[in-house]
Image (cartoon, grey):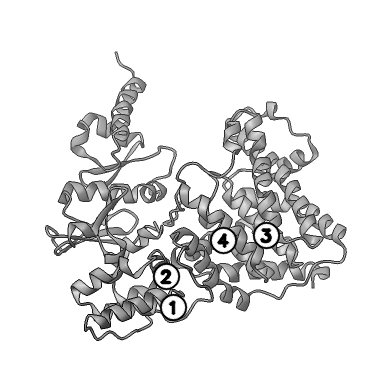
Amino acid sequence: MVSPAEKLAQSLEKLQHLQDAGKIAIRSSDLTRIHRERLVKNGFLTEVMKGWYIPARPDLLAGESTAWYASFWSFCADYLTVRFGYDWCLSPEQSLNLHVGNRTVPQQLIVRSSAGSNNITRLPQNTSILDFNGALPPKADIEQVEQLNLIRLPSALISCSPNYFRNNSTDARAALAMISDASEILPLLLEGGHTIIAGRLAGGFRNIGRDRIADDILKTMKGADFDCREENPFVNTPSITFGRTDRSPYVNRVKLIWNDMRVPILETFPKPPGLPQNIDNYLEQVQEIYVTDAYHSLSIEGYRVSRELIEKVRLGSWNPDADEKDREHRDALAARGYWQAYQAVRQSLKRVLAGENAGLVADEEHGDWFRELFGPSVTAGILRPADLAGYRSGQVYIRHSIHVPPNVEAVRDMMPTFFELLQDEPEPEVRAVLGHFVFVYIHPYMDGNGRTGRFMMNLMLGSGGYPWTVIPVERRADYLSSLETASTKHDIAPFAKFLAELVQKSIEGNPEAK
């Protein structure tokens, strides 16, 4: 007689075969009813809509959004291909978002197909697909990226709504910066007689400092007897410009995000107290707050740690062999790693308080913090030594977030730019807020990004003489919500206000920082 465990194993093998074939959107017909029902019952498969499923993890709670957000783009690509074959493409606006690396899950994905029915397909977590009935662009203007049919960049810039430049200015500027020469876009403008659009794009290129492209568009359109008038499609002009070689959308998006978010931070944050005169006293206060900081920071990450455990780890009296339960063992390893990383950050802070550039120190030593954070887990055999090698080598997703961190290649581009921005930023409050936010936005590690981001924040706070500030676990919801708003809506104000309130309380509780 076959045991229930053996039956489940057989069903899991069927699911594995589908996944090995690259299937994310699994149809009812892909599995027998018995295998499908068994996998659903045991939490390895979850229903998206009638007849369609995605793989899931049984350890996640019912209604958990992570599996859906992680599967969204692949599911939509599979689902749309089954429905329409190759007769579909994403909207110009969504195509542009993906061209510049913005993979935030949209509330509604707009798709064009000649077989579309102008209907809305409801999906989990209040997301949906609108299949709009309409003719597709010529085949030459469509390209497939990760199985998604996108309108090519030049054609998408011509086809997108004027509102896109106002409402999605960061992505629109990053998309324009990917065009290196007017010849990439002029044939489409001339063939279509797009005089108004040509004027809008010329104004957009001039807005980002690409005057040569703007002038070439206007001269060529005029030479072809088109009356073309330049119009700036953006509501403001950034303080940064892009040269002809600055084509990486990931690098440009980081620069634009930083530029756009500086002002709200400066308007919100208390003025920096200035570097402390007594460095040893400042570092002693940082050490005194360790237990409180570790408790709240680890609790935010979901570790079940007590102040008693943290104190045992700090004193070196914790014995991992005494922990019988795997969960308790992992929590204790996390606490030990936090203690080691905290000491490494204090050494970095000592350099900053002595007057060294905070961005440079963070660039040189953040890898040390990460290695200390997870060193105990390597020693215990839970992680491999290779896991401490550096930035992640695979895609990562954030629980409950529609923000999808950039891919591996983008991380390698964005992190050097991030540290350059930190080094060049003159205001410590901007370094503190964006040092935390941009780090977790990029999410360069497979794990530990939140803890490292908070270390980054406090190192930058120290560069302005602000006291070390703890983010309390009781305000976890506000903290994560404000980060989500910054990541998905590019509105840093709620996060800046949240941190400013905590920093102000820290200053009031620390007379020497006033």
Q: Quadrant of residue 165?
A: bottom left
Q: Quadrant of the C terminus?
A: bottom right
Q: Residue at x 64, y 68 (%)?
A: 425
Question: Residue at label 4?
Answer: 437
Residue 207, disc: 1
Q: Earlier in the sequence, mark 3 or mark 2?
A: 2
Q: Residue at x 32, y 32 (%)?
A: 20
Q: Earlier in the sequence, mark 2 or mark 4?
A: 2
Q: Nearer the viewer, mark 2 or mark 4?
A: 2
CA neighbours of label 4 inside 10 A, class few (<14), some (14 to 19), many (20+): many
Q: Nearer the viewer, mark 3 or mark 4?
A: 3
Residue 2, disc: none
* Amino acid beneath label 1: Asn
Q: Are marks 2 and 1 in contact (CB under 8 Å)?
A: yes
Distance between the alpha carbons at the discs numbered 3 and 2: 26 Å
Q: Position of residue 132 (x, y in %)?
A: 18, 63
Q: Nearer the viewer, residue 405 or 10?
A: 405
Q: Nearer the viewer, residue 281 or 41?
A: 281
Secondary structure under the numbered disc 4 in the rendered image: helix
Residue 173, disc: 2
Distance between the alpha carbons at the discs numbered 2 and 4: 21 Å
Q: Position of residue 194 (x, y in %)?
A: 23, 77
Residue 359, disc: 3
* Amino acid beneath label 4: Phe
